[in-house]
Amino acid sequence: QELNSAVESGKKEVSEFRDKKLQESDWCGVREVLTNSTTLVKLDLYGTAMGVVGAKEMAVVIKANTSLESLAIGSNNIGDEGAKAVSVGLASNRTLVTLDLGWNEIGVVGAQAVRDALLSNSTLESLSLEWNEIGVVGAQAVRDALLSNCKLESLNLSWNDIGDEGAKAVCEGLA
């Protein structure tokens, strides 16, 4: 209800939901409100207990919404399955510039899905994947994306246990 009011009033930025725990049943309504929003540019849903169910609903939003430029959905325990869903939306999105996926228990499979999305996404400039579990193989997947995605300017992979080998792989993608 609050989100609907904010969107209907033409708000460009919504952050009042940060760290408010939403129920699984709320996410369908969130999708319905955001899918057709044409004014909302920045949305912070960090720490809203999104989980996989919410991530799948947000994937629909990411795919369909034509105004959203910045989306923070970190600290929501979406895991690999949620990252795969979000990545499907990201692959065809043409407006999102900033995406925060930090603190989401994303592993190798999720990192590979993000890689696949970045291979076809041409607008994302900033991606945060900090405090996940992508490891060396996930860092190698990110490298593969960096080799062909020239738009990404900012990438946060801190606290992912990528080690020297993973760091070297990411550097190869930047060269």
Image (cartoon, rainbow, N blue to C red):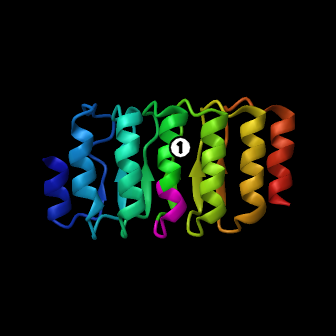
164 vs 56, left or right, is right
Residue 48 position in % (x across, y down): 33, 35
Q: Which residues are magenta?
A: 89-95
Residue 45 position in % (x across, y down): 35, 44
**Which residue is under mark 1?**
84
172 vs 148, left or right, is right
Residue in the image at 41% along x and 34% along y? 52
Label 1 Cα crowd, 10 Å radius (few <14 / some 14-19 / many 20+): many
Quarter holding the C terminus? Answer: bottom right
Q: Is residue 144 visible?
A: yes
Is 59 above or below relative to 123? above
Residue closer to the observer: 15 or 133:
133
Please tell me whether residue 131 belongs to the stretch shown in magenta: no
Is 90 above or below relative to 136? below
Residue in the image at 37% along x and 54% along y? 60
Residue 58 position in % (x across, y down): 37, 49
- Residue type at mark 1: give it: Lys
